[in-house]
Image (spheres, rainbow, N blue to C red):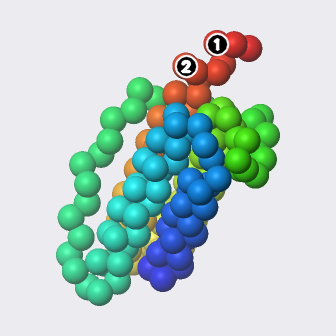
Amino acid sequence: ALEIAIEHERNSFDVYRKALKIVKDQQARRVLEELAEEELDHRHLLEKALVGEIVALHEEEESTGSPMNLSYFLQEKPLDENSSPQDVMVYAIHDEKRSVDFYRQMATQCAGAPMEELFARILEEETVHLAKLEETYEKLYMSQM
């Protein structure tokens, strides 16, 4: 289960790294850089657990609320050199939603196992990240609707 989660984080990091090579807008690049760093942190945490280290879980991050499920109505499209900050935000919301779903499934499948707590904690962190992205999207773009 840990190897699968590590691969998930590696893939998420690669998506953001590749996007950084093509996205030119500075605001969009900052969002991508922050997300890439978060994926590296999660991967490092999982790799430490894989080699048997006792993993100190991060303090819970603060968010003003639950995710708004924007991924249900925002259309995702591949990022390219012309991607706007809004395109990057939509893409990031979808990617974080996939991570929330992934860790929810991993925590459920590992119920009763030692890794359940780790996956549940990463699920909490990913849920907070998703909520923060959605809050930012709402502030930046939904007022224009």
The label shown at residue 139 is: 2
- Residue 124 to residue 73: above or below: below
Q: Residue at x 33, y 35 (%)?
A: 62
Instruction: Where is residue 101? Give x, y as percent.
Output: 60, 57
* Disc 1 residue crowd, few under 14, some 14–19, many 20+, Cα 10 Å: few
Instruction: Say left or right for 74 vs 65.
Output: right
| Vertical side of 128 occupied by 86: above or below | above
Label 2–label 1 contact, CB within 8 A: yes
The disc labelled 1 sits on which kind of residue? Ser
Q: Residue at x 60, y 61 (%)?
A: 18
Q: Is residue 120 visible?
A: no
**Distance in Å between CA atoms under marks 2 and 1:** 7 Å
Seen from the viewer's position, the closer of residues 72 and 31 is: 31
**Residue 111 or 88: which is nearer the viewer?**
88
**Residue bearing the label numbered 1:** 143
* Residue 42 figure quarter: bottom left
Residue 93 is situated, as x and y percent measured from the top left of the image, at: 61, 43
